[in-house]
């Protein structure tokens, strides 16, 4: 055969899906659903009766977990909907750069520098004020479908 080496593109993704299917009739309020390719948290579910031609329908009202936009979808209750894998991870805040990125400490001691400050004004001011006061802050990062955003803040005491 050939003596040349084969090079493969190495991606950190294990090939796991960003979503999993779930029957529309089993998705409840405060659950998650994908509407228009956006991960959303369900705020309201209403189910209509079966009509002359079959399926009961579920009407979902949901809010995008990253940008806060309200989205709606109507799906037959027997059909499958995509449900996003949503994970929350806590990181310790190390630094805030001038261009709006944060430097975070992961559990294994590495730094994570690819996250922007949140757009939510209240959370943004809490982070900046707490960091300016020299407090030890732990931020909770919510990640889903390849997107990440800081969603909460905890104060673990002074440095």
Image: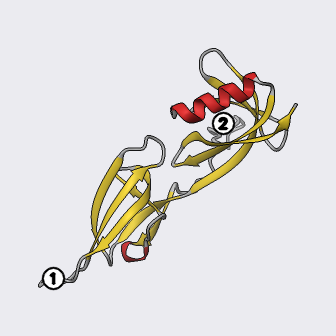
Horizontal and vertical percent for residue 56? Answer: 25, 79
On-image quarter of the N terminus = top right
Q: The C terminus lies in which quarter of the figure?
A: top right
Q: Tell me which residue sits at (80%, 31%) in the image.
A: 135
Label 1 element class: loop
* Quadrant in which residue 103 is drawn: top right
* Residue 40 shows in this picture: yes
Q: Quadrant of residue 112?
A: top right
Res 95 quadrant in image: top right
Rendered residue at 11%/85% (across/down): 52
Viewer-nearest of discs 2 and 1: 1
**143 shown above or below 21:** above
* Label annotation for residue 155: none
Q: Residue at x 24, y 77 (%)?
A: 48
Tell me the CA gap for discs 2 and 1: 57 Å
Q: Position of residue 42 (x, y in %)?
A: 42, 61
Q: Nearer the viewer, residue 6 or 143?
A: 143
Q: Residues within 10 Å of mark 2 (few under 14, many from 20)?
A: few
Classify 10 Å Cα crowding around label 1: few (below 14), some (14-19), many (20 and above). Answer: few
Q: Position of residue 124 (x, y in %)?
A: 59, 30
Left or right: 49, with 70 as reference point: left
Q: Looking at the image, is 31 positioned above or below residue 57?
A: above
Q: Secondary structure at mark 2?
A: loop
Q: Residue 61 versus residue 35: which sits nearer the camera?
A: 61
Residue at image position (63%, 24%) is: 101
Please give the residue where the numbered disc 2 appears in the rendered image. 7
**Residue 116 seen by the camera:** no
Tell me whether the residue at label 2 lies in contact with that at label 1, contact meaning CB atoms closer than 8 angstroms: no
Furthest toward the right, the residue is 159
Residue that carries the numbered disc 1 in the rendered image:
51
In this view, the residue in front, 156 or 61, is 156
């Amino acid at each position: 055969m050939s003596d040349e080496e084969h090079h493969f593109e190495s991606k950190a993704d294990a090939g796991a899906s960003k979503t999993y299917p779930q029957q529309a009739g089993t998705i409840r309020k405060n659950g998650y659903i994908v509407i228009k390719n956006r991960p959303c948290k369900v705020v309201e579910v209403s189910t209509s009766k079966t009509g002359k031609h079959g399926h009961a329908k579920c009407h979902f009202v949901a809010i995008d977990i990253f940008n806060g936009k309200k989205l709606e979808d109507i799906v037959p209750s027997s059909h499958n909907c995509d449900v996003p894998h949503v994970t929350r991870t806590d990181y310790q805040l190390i630094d805030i750069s001038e261009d709006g990125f944060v430097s975070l400490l992961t559990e294994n001691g590495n730094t994570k520098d690819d996250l922007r400050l949140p757009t939510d004004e209240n959370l943004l001011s809490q982070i900046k004020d707490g960091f300016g006061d020299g407090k030890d802050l732990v931020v909770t990062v919510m990640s889903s479908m390849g997107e990440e955003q800081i969603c909460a803040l905890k104060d673990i005491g002074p440095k």
